[in-house]
Image (spheres, helix red, strand yellow):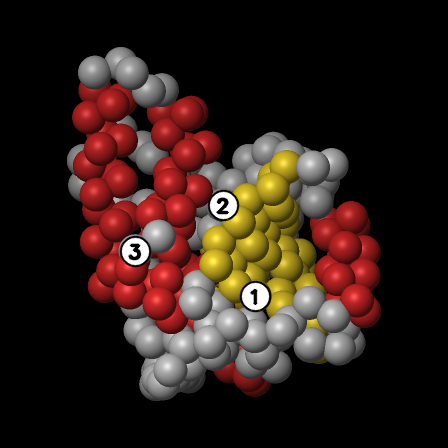
Amino acid sequence: MSEALRLESIGAVLRWSPKHLPGKHDQYTHGSWAQGRGGKRDVRTAKLKAAVADAESRIRDIRSHEELYAFDANGNQVLYKVGNQDSVSMSPTEGALLKGATATHNHPLDTDGSSFSMDDILVAQVTGMAEMRAVGGRYTHSMKLPVGAGDMTSLMQAINRDVTAETWIAIGTGTMSVAEANARHYHELWTRFVNTPSVKKQGWSYERTERGG
């Protein structure tokens, strides 16, 4: 990969335009995808949990910009980046530091804390992260990736199209507001994604928890 990677959260996920699909996925070169048998990894040592909790306590309520912390399996910080209001950019050299790491960042545009954009998960997969996390005022989101995860981009895009199509219908019939659609879109996408048999078999895991829960 010669281009910078961008982790991007979504402000207005849905706009009233049938041409808009949430989640831009083509702004960097994916490079070679890791292949092989999937398997869950032990990434949550006590030191790592403490380091992640401390970082998230500092960034969760930031509303002006995104910040990203990344830690290795032993809880040692390997990367810290400050971004703008909707993204954090990393160089290929910085991206290489994320292999096997747990990375957490805040999503400031939604007070509650929106789930992952497609860019978030694609960057996590390209760099070989063990876990990607996103936090906000109410929610903490976690996506754990299996070792040697295959390229699931086409499936992500297909599910994204399905969720988008259903959402436009719901908005058009008045059963869902645009604000509700913004809040639920990516959580619905990743919930469906990890419950797909091929994804389940690889060992992906997605979770959303509430603050204080």
CA gap, disc 2 and disc 1: 14 Å
Tell me which numbered mark, 3 or 2, is placed earlier along the sequence. Answer: 2
Asked whether the viewer can see residue 109, the reply is no
Question: Any mark on residue 146, and which?
Answer: none
Asked whether the viewer can see residue 39, the reply is yes
Q: Is residue 87 left or right of residue 62?
A: left
Q: What element carries label 1?
A: strand
Seen from the viewer's position, the closer of residues 48 and 196 is 196
Q: What element carries label 3?
A: loop
Q: Is residue 86 left or right of residue 213?
A: left
Question: Any mark on residue 131, and which?
Answer: 1
Where does the C terminus fall, quadrant-wise? top right
Tell me which numbered mark, 1 or 3, is placed earlier along the sequence. Answer: 1
Q: Which amino acid does label 3 sit on?
A: Thr
What residue sits 66% from the left and 56% below the top?
A: 67
Question: Any mark on residue 196, and which?
Answer: 3
Where does the N terminus fall, quadrant-wise? bottom left
The number of callouts visible is 3
Is disc 2 in contact with disc 1, using a CB cutoff of under 8 Å? Answer: no
What residue sits 22% from the left and 46% below the top?
A: 161
Mark 2, other Cα within 10 Å: few <14 / some 14–19 / many ≥20: many
Q: Mark 2 points at which residue?
A: 115
Seen from the viewer's position, the closer of residues 188 and 107 is 188
Tell me which numbered mark, 2 or 1, is placed earlier along the sequence. Answer: 2
CA gap, disc 3 and disc 2: 18 Å
Q: Quadrant of residue 13?
A: top left
